[in-house]
Image: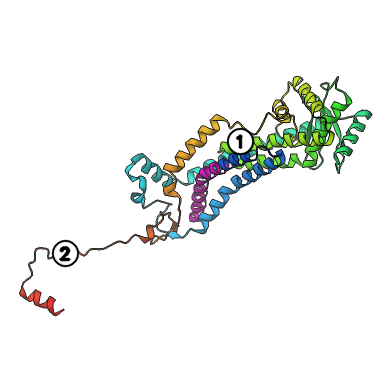
Amino acid sequence: MIQIHSLLLESAGWAVLHSLWQITLIMLILIGALYCFRNKSAAMRGVITQSALALMFLSAPINFFWLLMHAVPAADSRWAFNGLEALPGRAFQPHSLLISWLYSHAFVPALLWAAGTGAALFLLAADWLAARQFLQRCIPSASTPLNQLLCMAENRLGCRQQAPLLWSSEIDTPATAGIVRPAVILPAGRLNGLSSKQLELLMLHELAHIQRHDALRISAAKLAVCFLFFHPAAWYALNLLQKQCEECCDAMVVAATGARNDYVRTLAEIENRRSLQTFSVLAGNGGELLQRIRALIGKETDFPYPKFIQQFHASLLLLTIFLLPPCADHRLLPGGHGGTYAQMPAGAAHVKTTVQRPDHDADHVPDNDDLDHQDKE
């Protein structure tokens, strides 16, 4: 049982380590794909971002199961790299020491990952609970004109289900909340002076979130990022996805009404009235209104790529080049009188070893009889 636990921990540790460079590679591919499709719709770019985030999430589990499938009994009581002297970086002592430490303590990344994931899941659950309590504090709208306006917006957008209209003084922009029973929430006292057409445009945007099931989409992405908390690329992809969801809904509003200029002016008016912080788990909470306005007028894309993310990925690529290639092949080879598992480098099983018998008669000088015996043979 202890041997199995050791195998699981160390496999998980190596899976997390290799996912570092794999997620970086996926992120670079994502940036290139978004650049190539920068003139396409936000919906298409959103699909690309979701696919990249899914691949990031699957990288570590694939590594983990691959390691388990290649595990065979070995002699050492841990996954040790017994062929350290064969590494290309053997001449660099810090490099060799770090590789040796990783092979001796591969379970440490797994434990750190488990602790960090637990903390991230706890914070996400707390945020969900706070959003649920917030939804319970919202007040149903008793305004007949507003309810009729919402029904008109639902008919214009072709919504299949009717969403209740709620009021709240805890937000400063319209929002949606709920996955099974979504609701449209309006900020109390912050929409005074807006025309009925502007209110309809705002309702259309929130109904677009409901029609696209963005609450479920964003919640699933946040859950995936909890398991990828250690990599900034996952957080950046989540931020891109949220931004693309907002842009998709804006595009749906413009397509349904054709009032791009009126919608831009409405968003600008809402931005001037913002002052509160909304819950991060709400599907539509306004987002970065200035970025949305720039996207509507064609002056905003998914870039620039944050400089600190660029520096992190550059450092991680250097780490991948100088550190992880020697560990790229984790075939687990048999090692004698084991019972536990050991990890060996690629090609270690094919190294030929020659055994020389000790020459006890090194000083013996062959005579004629010896030479005659050799001739007969």
Which tag, 1 or 2, sits closer to the chain's start? 1
Amino acid type shown at disc 1: Tyr
User: Where's the C terminus, which quadrant?
Assistant: bottom left
| Label 1 Cα neighbours within 10 Å, binned few <14 / some 14-19 / many ≥20 | some
Q: Which residue is mark 1?
A: 236
Image coordinates of residue 313 in percent, x first then y, are 52, 36
Is residue 124 depicted above or below 343 in this figure?
Answer: above
Farthest residue, direction right:
144
Q: Is residue 150 found left or right of 86 in the rendered image?
A: right
Mark 1 lies on a secondary structure that is: helix
Where are the magenta residues, as a range?
A: 1-26
Farthest residue, direction left:
368
| Label 2 Cα neighbours within 10 Å, binned few <14 / some 14-19 / many ≥20 | few
Q: Is residue 33 found left or right of 373 in the rendered image?
A: right
**Quadrant housing residue 247:** top right
Q: Which residue is mark 2?
A: 359
Image coordinates of residue 118 in percent, x first then y, are 60, 40
Residue 371 shows up from this direction: yes
Report the number of discs.
2
